[in-house]
Amino acid sequence: MRWRSIAHMSSPTTELAAGPAPGALKDDAAVIGLVGAGHMLSHYSQLLLAPLFPWLKAEFNVSYTELGFLMTVFFVMSCAVQTSSGFMVDRFGPRPILFAGLALLACAAFGFASSTSYWMLMFFSVIGGVGNGVFHPADYTLINRKVSPGRLGHAYSVHGITGSLGWALAPVMLVPLAIAYSWRVALVGAGCLFLLVLALLVIYRARLHLPPLQVAPQQGEAKREGSFDFLAIPAVWMCFGFFFFYSAALSAVQTFAPEAAGKLHSVPPTLVAICLTTYMLAAAGGMVLGGFLISNPERCERIVGFGFGVIVCISLLIGFGSLPVWMVPVLFGVMGFAAGSSSPSRDMLVKRSAPPNASGRVYGVVYSGLDIGQALMPLIFGAMMDKGRYQAVWVVLALTQAVLIVSAFNVRKVRRTPLPATA
């Protein structure tokens, strides 16, 4: 059987609640806002340490590679937990999993603040990675099952915007606190922020109530669908590969690309610090546009391809061009807007590749590719920086974006191929 969209294919099982009925705008907005608040802190947690690298490098007398390894530990744990948490979300519901993640992130922030050795930082990187790993399966399960279908595009857009705002907030909040007081005070402030948002979600927990997924067999059906049958869908693994390369590019932007650009074009440290915030704020703006662009889901691959094509060109320009200092943060903003406008279409790629009764599991597996890329690439980029190979950072960034363009269209291709009989 040829299939246009996995989300619409017939299944050997029928969900008791296959999707949300059209609901009131205020109900959808409440779910989107609460989920977005948690997602913002998930992304915020990913940059708890990176903006503080100059202080940590001096405090613990470590190299860029060793600092990059802390992020590797964080994302390795996040990857492992993300895959398993998808099954837990389908089994127990997303709300308790979401609360546990925020509590662990608060614990990690306070732990970082009290660390007296590099090994303590590594231990709390493990705790932070475990907390971060629950968000995508929980978030997308809540959005896909509680938000009206007609508002899904905007829900993905807001979800992406809050993530970018979390990335943008981290350096804006942590660096001034570190300068004014100390890096330890900055991390204590981060821990308090995690607890504040956790309290908000607990207060409005009724909005996030979603019972564990229940599947009833169709009449005459002898055997229920297995928990791992979704792994036979080729598009799931193509999405996994897409997110691996997406995170490889993202880790460059978040960690060492601003400093590499600063070295290549003699950008002062104050402007280097602005580059990442500019990228993230522009990405948030792009996501607003992206929410409207996917009104027709059939064009999501073309939107992704165009956005990442723009980033390829800018990466090569920064790596090999001769630019005035002021243009570097501007180009970071253009890259961010291009990436942001593609983000809702990226999420739609996954939704269209997911069986309706395996949302948490699919998002757990697919988004583990995001964590694997972010675990591996800081080591590679850190080694490049230690050896002074600043152009190589931008070459690798351009190459990963080119691979993303090919991957997006491959997802479309395999989604339209026949499924194995067992799937």
Image (spheres, rainbow, N blue to C red):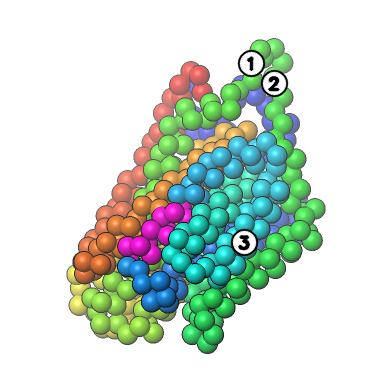
Q: Main secondary structure of the magenta part?
A: helix
Of 42 and 129, the residue lying toward us: 129
Identify the amino acid type marked 2: Pro
Please tell me the numbered disc located at residue 6: none
Find the magenta span and give its range.
64-75
| Residue plotted at (38% across, 36% down) | 413
Numbered tag placed on residue 217 in the rendering: 2
Mark seen at residue 107? 3
Camera sees residue 219: yes
* C-alpha gap between disc 2 and disc 3: 42 Å
Q: Residue furthest front?
A: 116
CB within 8 Å, label 2 to label 1: yes
Quadrant housing residue 40? bottom right
Q: Residue at coordinates 25% horizontally, 77% vertically from top-left?
A: 263
Front tag of 3 and 1:
3
Q: Is mark 1 on a helix, strand or loop?
A: loop
Q: Label 1 belongs to which residue? A: 223
- Quote the CA–CA distance across marks 3 and 1: 43 Å
